[in-house]
Amino acid sequence: MKVCLIVEGAYPYLLGGVSSWIQQMLLEFKDVEFVIQTLVVDRDEKKEFKYKIPDNVTEIREIYLLDYDFVKKSRKRFRVKKNEYLALESLFYGNEVNWKGIFDFFQNQNISLDKLLTSKEFLQMTKNYYKKNYENAVFTDLLWTMRSMYLPLFLLLKNKPVEADIYHSMSTGYSGVFGSMSKYIYNKPLLVSEHGIYTREREEEIIKANWVKGFYKDLWIQQFYKFSSCCYDFADEVTALFEGAREFQVDLGCLREKTNVIHNGVNVSEYEHIPSKGDFDEYINVGAILRVTPIKDVKTMINAFCLAKKEVPNLKLWIMGPLDEKPKYVKECMQLVSDLEIKNVVFTGKINVKDYIGKMDYMVLSSLSEGQPLVILEGFAAKKPCISTNVGDCISLIYGKDDKVGDAGVIVPVMNVEKMAKAMVNLAKDEKTRLEMGLNGYNRVNKFYQNETVFKEYKKLYEKLIQDKLQGL
């Protein structure tokens, strides 16, 4: 079995929950051949493998979403046939995008994107869209927005997919569209797995972004909704981490019968003999395992820790994770620590989680968006409770779903410094509750979130997709 795993902005160049999950799956499926199709921004991006690539990965291919257009110059006039024009124009409106026609257009001819985006046909499409929707806007601004918005997509679609038995996209978005095109070209099954709801995450980012203003935000948001519709239409099976995420997928247009819920998991046995806190450690150690990026809202955590430390002076915050993804944000976080004159805040950089997590008294997660965070499950495996914002499936992980296991931490509102600080103080002062909650988390992860169960479900899905294909379903 040969699986093409399609990843956007993650493995093998970035650390994080999705990348860790991919590495675990590759190691688990030793009898499956994998080709990694990874989507990155551009060729100038510093790239080094963050993981030891398993032997069953036979190839790693890169696609650049911002790149040079390698097409021989030609004096031949650029022409778009009527059916091609209609397919491309359908992208503007999004109600019924002719994705098959678009895939054929980019795969069957060597197209200069410069000529396409400056052609009279693209100009006419933009004029039509302008007259129908945005006549009060500045036309040249709209034209340049449409060019910049479609360039990454068109660059993506010019790439020839590798042939495989199964295409497995780790999100919707650009990787999901590439998976859809791969399925269309080779008539092989497509599995889409979402660790977070990509469309909603991009929508939140664009709403907060400064690089796009006014109604242009709507244009970019609509673009990602079109991508999700494409992925859900072409996919044979779609997975989510929890029921709430599955409902989002259905709301976004995915057929319910395609959807599956497969939880995250960890190998609990690997945490049995990890280093623990020393008897002479005078601090209450608060652990945060994360990428230091805006989506993790590290600044709220730092501010909350500052308040909590005034009441519990022996608190110590360990911010554990890579610092190279968003250097500007890292610098802002470190400056905040300095400005507030907070002692005992440690930025460790990249770590081996098992070397540190056993030394913590409890964990904290301040994210603005999550799916079903592996860091909470890893903490549970090490018998550490967690204070978490109410995002994704965190409330179910920490409070359970009528499983009678008991609370394994505290849920607080997003971006609420005071309530996060109060939770930090309460857990710091109450060792008995900390230990009870840690044991509850350990019991919950043992019962419901074991890696072995998770990957058995994915193996079954792979086998089902192959079998359904052989039977012509």
Image (cartoon, rainbow, N blue to C red):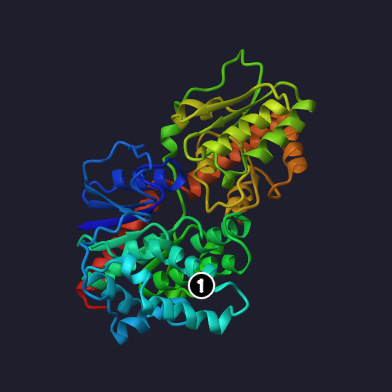
Across the whole image, how many numbered discs are drawn on residues? Answer: 1
Say whether residue 192 is left or right of residue 131: left
Query: Residue 214, position in %: x, y?
Result: 63, 66
The image quadrant of residue 88 is bottom left
Farthest residue, direction front: 75
- Disc 1 residue type? Val
**Does the image show residue 362?**
no
Choose between 123 and 428: the one closer to the eye: 123
Choose between 120 and 418: the one closer to the eye: 120
At a point 50% along the width and 80% down the height, the residue shown is 129
Query: Residue 290, position in %: x, y?
Result: 53, 39
**160 over 413 or under it: above or below:** below
At a point 21% along the width and 49% down the height, the residue shown is 31
Locate the N terminus and report the quarter of the image it occupies: bottom left
Query: Residue 420, position in %: x, y?
Result: 72, 41
At a point 62% along the width and 34% down the height, the residue shown is 333
**Does the image show residue 278?**
yes
Identify the residue under disc 1.
250
Query: Residue 451, position in %: x, y?
Result: 40, 46
